[in-house]
Amino acid sequence: MTDIKSLFDQLTANLQQLEKLFSTTKAVQALVSRIPCVIKGQEQAAINQITPELSTDMLAMKLASEAFQDIHIKHPFSQKSARRYVGVIHLHPEHQNTAKIVLLIKAINTIKAEIEHAVVSENVSRQARFSAIHDNCPGVMTVHLYRKIHCLENESVKSVRFSWQRKDSLHQPDKLKLLGEINAEKERAMPDNQLALDQLQQKVTSTPEQDLRIRRPVKVQPAANIVRVIGLKTVTAPLPIIIVQKEALAASEVMAFIASQVRQQRSDKRKNTLLGTLSGHTIERVAL
């Protein structure tokens, strides 16, 4: 069995060493925004606006260090919603600390991957995986423990722009199972909802299984659009991105998210047919 505790102790030591290096490193450019945290119990609340709190220069370096070390559960914040720090740190490759920082980040990411692999591959049940994590890494927040630090070294980055991704999860359901869920909902529904459920049941029954889709909303998340000489790379950005290169690059902070500012759908994109709703999810028929 993998010694997860020793790996975690090494990870903690490396993160502390990274903080020391960051505290004495002047970046070419540094901007990091703290995203307001979700309070425990408010995970399902509608998100109308998110206002990031921007730090720059050495304050951004300090916030980035805090972000990388933020791997534990914190009261009163949610354990289901990740705490996010969005930004970019541009380091010059000839700075005396840069090579050490790059090596440390690689080591940190390797240890994170080793812990995740050990937990998943050596423990069959969900409860066993839970115990493996929390017995060896007390107080840790798993989603934070596993997330990697993006480090782009000499990739000729031209610009880094941040945006908010607001996508839905769309998947093809098992038709018989879906009809069973509709029947179960009908049994406990109020009389006012019976007609809508009857109509949904009829529409699902008459729709081929391969044409059915269930759309579930996914929480809005920050993304980085990284333009390199070889092309565009888009990644989720819950942690500051480290870029090491001599060339200058254009970067801007993540702006506020405002739910009412909905992006317009492409005019040439075919729209699915809405069949109805069930448990807060929409049931659709794909466009032909």
Image: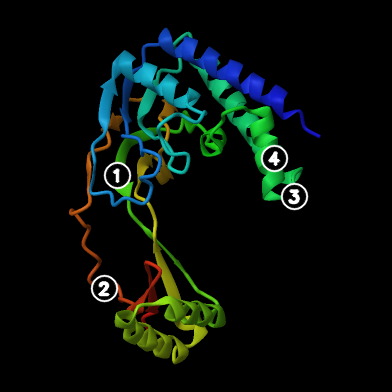
User: Which residue is under mark 1?
Assistant: 163
Q: Which mark is residue 268?
A: 2
Q: Nearer the viewer, mark 3 or mark 2?
A: 3
Sort mark 2 into few (<14), some (14-19) or many (20+) by Cα contacts within 10 Å: few
Q: Which mark is residue 119?
A: 4
CA gap between label 3 and label 2 equals 47 Å
Q: Residue 176: percent from the left, percent from the top?
A: 55, 83
Q: Nearer the viewer, mark 4 or mark 1?
A: 4
Q: Quadrant of the C terminus?
A: bottom left
Q: Nearer the viewer, mark 2 or mark 4?
A: 4
Q: Is residue 101 left or right of residue 256?
A: right
Q: Which of these two is toward me, 100 or 110?
A: 110
Is tag 4's residue or tag 1's residue first in the polypeptide sequence?
A: 4
Q: Residue 132: percent from the left, percent from the top?
A: 70, 36
Q: Secondary structure at mark 2?
A: loop
Q: Is residue 50 above or below residue 90?
A: below
